[in-house]
Amino acid sequence: MHWYVMTHLEMQRFKGSLEAENARRLGEGRAVVDAFYPSDYLRGEVVDGAITKVASEARSMAQTLSRFVFLRGAEADINLLMAAEERRGSRVRLMYYTDTDGRRAVVSDRMMQDFFDACVKYRGFFEIVPTIEGIEAMDKVKINVGPFAGMEASVARVQYAKGAIHLELALELVNGAVTIKMSNVDCSQITILNRSSIDAIRADFIEYTQTHLLDILEHRVKGVADDAVRQRDAAMLTRLFRYRHHLVENRAAQMHFMALMLICAHLCRFMADEEELRDKVLAALAEINQKSESKAATDTRAYLWIALYLATRDPQYRDLAKQYVRDYQPKSDLLRRFVWLIRSGKKI
């Protein structure tokens, strides 16, 4: 499946109609159409009620891209969106963006991921990318430039201003701590020695993903029919799935994240992606099963079982996950909620 480059002169109106359409699709068990609005992303996307910080360069780029939207879905589904606007009699319509020869602009998943990463570079989207934007007070760093190059320091203060990062660093010297300031700091100028804050950011993102997936699954199990809820669910699913290509350093976390992305693909009804992720999850499960029983008894394996049950409907995976919770009593409340949701065997 590819991304189609589209244009629309009234983007806010299109957003509303697409959200409503995706909500209907979710209710009918059909695939949603993923939408990426580069202008919104660069201007400052609203996440959980707060607008993320962006660089000034990003805001200027946003205006240039204000009429563009990237849609990922079957061409037939996108044509249905266009036909719906024609039926409404609107003069302003969704259109394919074409080159001078009239050929539609189509972008592969890999190229779109590069585009996301370029946007990330400007925005400093902190949820999953381990850049200097994740640095926090008390982190330990090594200075790579200037008269103090090679020295280690503690971050005393982090200040964001005009798209730049300014640091106050405490150098531990024989006669006490000396504080220095570094302005417009980038990744080449310092090295983060303790990556605990970045690891926490990645862990937070996985927890963030789990929490929202649980909410959406609960809505499905309970049969929530509210259109506003369905619209929010569809938007959140496509937003979460957009990050499926990002890597998580820890292998167990990689497997965990892969299981969550398989659940996303299943809920979005992205069949090709679901098949690809299912194969990867099966390979990850086989990798865990090669270990000793004590090391294999991990929450990660339970998440793989949960994802495989949702994707395959094979009851053995559901029963294995339930048995794991009974035998090992995991501390994770999120894991127990996942198992509770699949225990009934209701199709989701």
Image: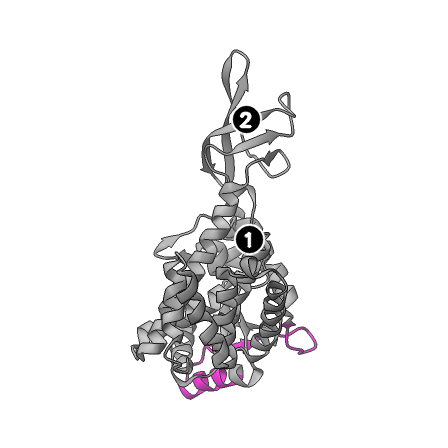
Q: Kindly indicate the quadrant of the structure image that contains residue 226.
A: bottom left
Label 2 or label 1, whichever lies nearer to me, is 2
- The amino acid beneath tag 1 is Val
Q: Residue 56 location, x and y as percent?
A: 50, 46
- The amino acid beneath tag 2 is Ala
Q: Is residue 243 magenta?
A: no
Up-down relation of residue 54 to residue 318 (above or below): above
Residue bearing the label numbered 2: 153
| Label 1 crowd bin: few (<14), some (14–19), many (20+), radius 10 Å | some
Residue bearing the label numbered 1: 120
Q: Closer to the N terminus: mark 2 or mark 1?
A: 1
Q: Residue 139 location, x and y as percent?
A: 50, 34
Q: Give left or right: position of 167 versus 107.
A: left
Up-down relation of residue 190 to residue 16 (above or below): above
Point out the stretch of residues depicted in magenta: 79-106
SS for callout 2: strand
Between 191 and 53, the residue placed more toward the observer is 191
What distance separates the C-alpha of mark 2 from that of mark 1?
27 Å
Please name the residue shown 61% across and 62% down the image.
113
| Label 2 crowd bin: few (<14), some (14–19), many (20+), radius 10 Å | many
